[in-house]
Image (cartoon, rainbow, N blue to C red):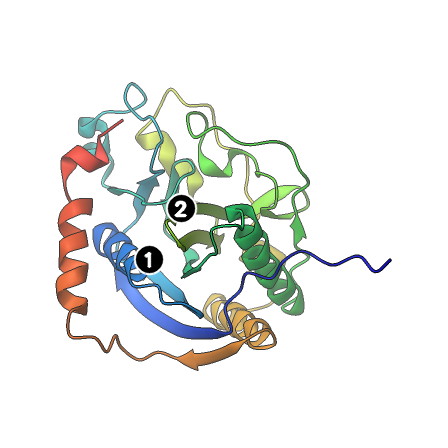
Amino acid sequence: MIQSGPPNPLPRHWSWWEDGAHDGVTNMAIDEALLATVRPGAGTWRWYAWSAPTVSFGRNERIAGRLAPAQLAASGLGAVRRPTGGRALLHHRELTYCVTMPLAAHLSWRVAYDAVNRVLRDALRTTGVPVQLAADGGPVSPDGPVCFDRPAAGELTVGGRKLVGSAVWRHGGAYLQHGSILLHDDQHLLQAISPSAAPTPAAATLTECRPDVDEEALGQRVRGAVHDTLQTRAEVQLRHERLDDDWPGLVASHRRHFSDPAWLWRR
């Protein structure tokens, strides 16, 4: 008997968006607006950067007792709480992506997660980065060490160290995945806002894997490799701007949500 492979949840049409640098609130507002406007058969792959070093907390991560607003203000770091799950990480010198796409009700979020990570794995390997998918080590609690402390099952690693931190959220028939691909390991900066936390183990980085390539060129190579890999699976069209008239207002409404201290400090 011929065994069928895993279901392929990736849509056939993709919008490719290489965005610029924004503050944390704006980045999360754009991503949640993309989630709110997911259409059947179409996904969006957005790349972006951060206008200042910013720590992001997972949607359900408990930070009460681990740090206080005064510590965060004194650190000089920005802060935002993501719409996705997972644990705290520091966004600075990295390549950040957001994937939004439809996901049928009968499919697990894990099917989408694995499909996106396989695209990233295949793309990174073409750039000379010896990346692997982490073996199943069980779920990682949102209440605990920081994101790059250890990989969760299915995350991307090099030599057993996490290279890509991933987080997901599903809302109805729409799926959102965040990912941070480290160019440099700046996660030790989290000690400034949580001095009682244990030191973060060293993470893998793109510049460590490919020291022979200029950092800017390396980022371009990785984005290009992901684009080309995705294009082998679907139709990919460059996105210059959002065309719907309601887009600025939609982003603004989500900015109000993510800028609310009650959301940032809710747990």
Q: CA distance from mark 2 to mark 1?
A: 9 Å
Residue sitting at the far right? 1
Q: Where's residue 235, x and y in %?
A: 51, 79
Residue type, numbered disc 1: Leu
- The secondary structure type at the circle numbered 1 is helix
Marks 2,1: beta carbons within 8 A: yes
Q: Quadrant of residue 203?
A: top right
Q: Residue at x 67, y 56 (%)?
A: 6
Q: Earlier in the sequence, mark 2 or mark 1?
A: 1
Q: Where's residue 213, x and y in %?
A: 57, 69
Which quarter of the rendering shows the C terminus?
A: top left
- The secondary structure type at the circle numbered 2 is strand
| 18 up-or-down from 78: above or below | below
Which quarter of the rendering shows the N terminus?
A: bottom right
- Depth check, front residue: 8 or 136: 8
Residue type, numbered disc 2: Trp
Asked whether residue 211 is in view, the answer is: no
Q: Which residue is mark 2?
A: 169
| 117 up-or-down from 60: above or below | below
Q: Which residue is mark 1?
A: 35
